[in-house]
Every structure is written in structure tokens, then in C-alpha cells.
Image (spheres, helix red, strand yellow):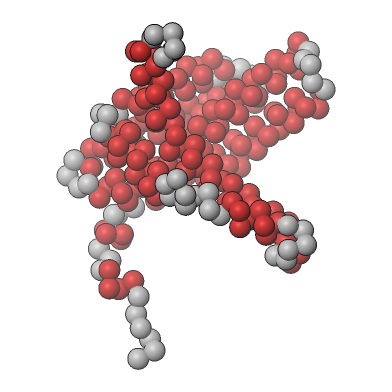
Amino acid sequence: AEVNGDHAEAHRLDERLGFLTPILKGFLTEAGKEAADLGIQVYGGHGYIKDNKAEQVYRDVRIAPVWEGTTQIQALDLLGRKIMLQKLKPITEHCNELYKLCWKHMFDTSALGTHARSLMRHTMEWHAMTYMIGFEAKSNKEWISSTSVDYLMYSGYVTLAAHWLQMEAVANQKLKEGGTEEEEFYKAKIQTSAFMFDYLLPRTRGHKANMWTPIESITDMKSENFSFDHSR
């Protein structure tokens, strides 16, 4: 767009990328860390030693949620700077895109329709919670810092589910009309989408609960009470 002289569109895309960057960086690096940890677990004790290189993968991936902005910094950037300072415009635009996606498939009678309706409910909840956090933050700015990481993770799961819904829709279409890949490839996509909606997306329940716990349980702890010298 910039090369073609469409500065307005270039600005729009830059703003869009700015909104998505903390979600992608923060959520995916945390997910990658979990995946590497499970890789060690699969090997059992052998995953902890160097022979199978699983521990090397974990050591390499562990830096990802730290460098180029820790997950906590990315979360504050997303909720505080990218959303609240822009008067919730980015989240509204993003959710509107998700509403369109869900509406396109939510009346499908297969699992695709079930997943689309689930994503619609989560998107509406995400949208509403953003406004609620903004309202609470007017009287207490600590609402931004105390909810930001759970908000980022919630955002990540919903955004990931949206991508899997699109892949599931394409896989269903290819199975009906024929595609360039073998049939099992498309079936695996549909199965993975089911895993996403049945197993991963429900994690948003915990993140939602954390966002609405009393912030005093976080903010009222005195800094000197985080550590006690029991050697005296």
C-alpha cells in the first residue's frame, strides 16, 4: 500500500499489525514454551538428559517469552497502549471481523457450526470484558496491570480458534469438492480444530475468572512481605 501511494491503507495496516503483534508474540511464545515442556514430559526421564535433545529445545524456547518484550510487557502494551489509549477502536474492529467470520458458518449443521457459535460467544465476551475493564480502569489504573496477562492469553486463544475455524471450513469444502492434498490431510485439520475448540479454548474460563478476582489480592501485598529471611 505504501509503495502504491495509498498512505491511508498503509496506516490502517500498520495499526492492525500493531494490535496483533503483542497477541502473537506474547501468546505464541507462551504456547511454544508449553509445547517444549510437554516434549520433555513425553520422553519421561530421558527428556531431561541431553541425548534426545528435548531439553535443548526447551532451553532454546525459554528465552522467547523474555526477549523482545516479556509477556507481561506485551500484555501491558496490548491492553494499555494499543486498546485503551486508542479508545477501544482496535478491539472493536478486530471483533467485528470475527463476528463476520462466525456468522458465515454458525448455521452450519456440522461441527463447524458448533465451533462458529462457540467462537461467537467468546468474541462477544472478549469484546464486552474489554469495555468492562476500561470502565473499572477509570477509577483504578491497577485494573490494567492486574488483568493484562490473562487478557492477552484470552485474546490469544480466541484468535487462534478463529484461525482454526477458517482451516476447518476450508478442509470441509475440500473434502466435498476435492483438493490437491490427500483426504487424511483434510480430516486431520478438522480433528485438530475439534481439539482446539474442545480442549484449548475452554482455558479462557480460567483466564476470565482471574481477570475478575479482587485486585486487592495482588496490589495489597507489601513488597517486603514477598521474602522473609528465615536464617536469622
Depth order, front residue of 106/6: 6
The quadrant where residue 89 appears: top left
Farthest-out residue, front: 3
**Which quadrant: the N terminus?**
top left
Q: Is residue 22 above or below residue 147?
A: above
- Rendered view: 95 above or below 21: above
Image location (x, y in percent) of residue 80: 30, 40
Q: Quadrant of the C terminus?
A: bottom left
Q: Nearer the viewer, residue 203 or 186?
A: 186
The residue at 67%/59% (across/down) is 55
Instruction: Tell me if 182 is positioned left or right of 31 in this view.
Output: right
- Residue 230 visible in the snapshot: yes
Query: Residue 115, position in %: x, y?
Result: 58, 28
Q: Position of residue 202 (x, y in %)?
A: 53, 42
The relative height of residue 126 versus residue 29 in the rendered view (above or below) is: above
Pick whichever, 89 or 135, lies toward us.
89
In this orientation, which residue lies closer to the viewer: 45 or 1? 1
Which residue is pictured at 47% across the width and 52% down the height?
A: 66
* Residue occupying the point 40% across, 34% down: 126
